[in-house]
Amino acid sequence: MGLEPTWPTRMGADPDAVGAWLSRSPELAAFERGHLSTERFYAALGGAFGASPSVARQAFCAWVTGPLPGAAELLDALTLPAFALSNTNVDHWAVFDPTRVLRSRLTALPSHHLGARKPETAAFQRATDAIGTADVLFLDDSPANVEAARAFGWRAERVVGVAECQAVLREAGALG
């Protein structure tokens, strides 16, 4: 999914400060597991940066810009089933693929539905249970998530962007 890195400025905050807050935020972790309401998350986010919950929500939703160009075509070229294990939340899930271009081509496993997020072992176990196999080639942009997936027993590669995904999938023989 595409991301807009300057979204915190929409609530009058410094992107680096917001990034640091999010990286250690128990509220974000709970929100992405589906264990915290939108009201409580945006009250915490806004409160941390002097913004109202509604302004914080509008800004946070602007972080996600939609599917990356070429992602749908890459999914169409796969010779294997695809799934998306994504650390996300109810609001980002609603805006990342509004026309369901990607979700119609894969099995979606968002963290807020699974009740666990990467790199937690529970996220990989619940994804395995949902797809019915541990024979997985997992692609992710986070080194921590790739290492956790490998420790769980999945084949995993770090990739950034559609072109890197395509190269790894081609090498794995997963493209038609």
Image (spheres, rainbow, N blue to C red):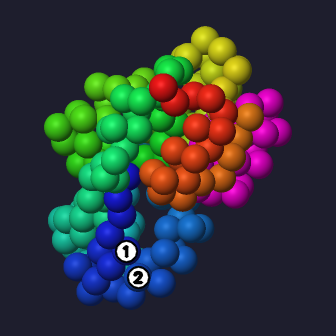
Q: What amino acid is at disc 2?
A: Pro
The Cα atoms of the two marked residues, 2 and 1, are separated by: 7 Å
Q: Position of residue 97 (x, y in %)?
A: 26, 42
Where residue 122 sits, quadrant-wise, is top right
Q: Is residue 97 left or right of residue 5?
A: left
Instruction: Indicate the position of residue 6 as horizontal and vertical percent values.
Output: 33, 79
The mark closer to the camera, 2 or 1, is 1
Answer whether labels 2 and 1 touch (C-beta < 8 Å): yes
Q: Which mark is residue 5?
A: 1
| Left or right of residue 127, residue 30 in this image | left
Which residues are drawn in magenta? 138-154
The amino acid pointed to by label 1 is Pro
From the viewer's perspective, tell me whether residue 20 is left or right of residue 128: left
Q: Which mark is residue 43?
A: none
Task: Give the residue drawn at x 47%, y 35%.
Answer: 84
- What residue is drawn where x is 59% and y is 68%? 24
Label 2 vs 1, first from the N-terminus? 1
Q: Magenta stretch: residue 153 in it?
A: yes
State the image coordinates of residue 33 (x, y, percent, origin top left): 50, 41
Label 1, secondary structure: give it: loop
In this rendered view, identify the residue nearer to me: 110 or 68. 68
Looking at this view, name the residue that lies furthest to the top. Answer: 132
Q: Looking at the image, which is closer to me, 85 or 38? A: 85
Q: Is residue 118 above or below residue 108?
A: below
**Residue 7 is drawn in which quadrant?**
bottom left
Q: Position of residue 72 (x, y in %)?
A: 32, 38
Q: Crowding at label 2, few (<14), some or many (≥20) Cα neighbours within 10 Å?
A: some
Residue that label 2 marks: 15
Residue 111 in sight: no
Inspect this view and state whether residue 112 appears. Answer: yes
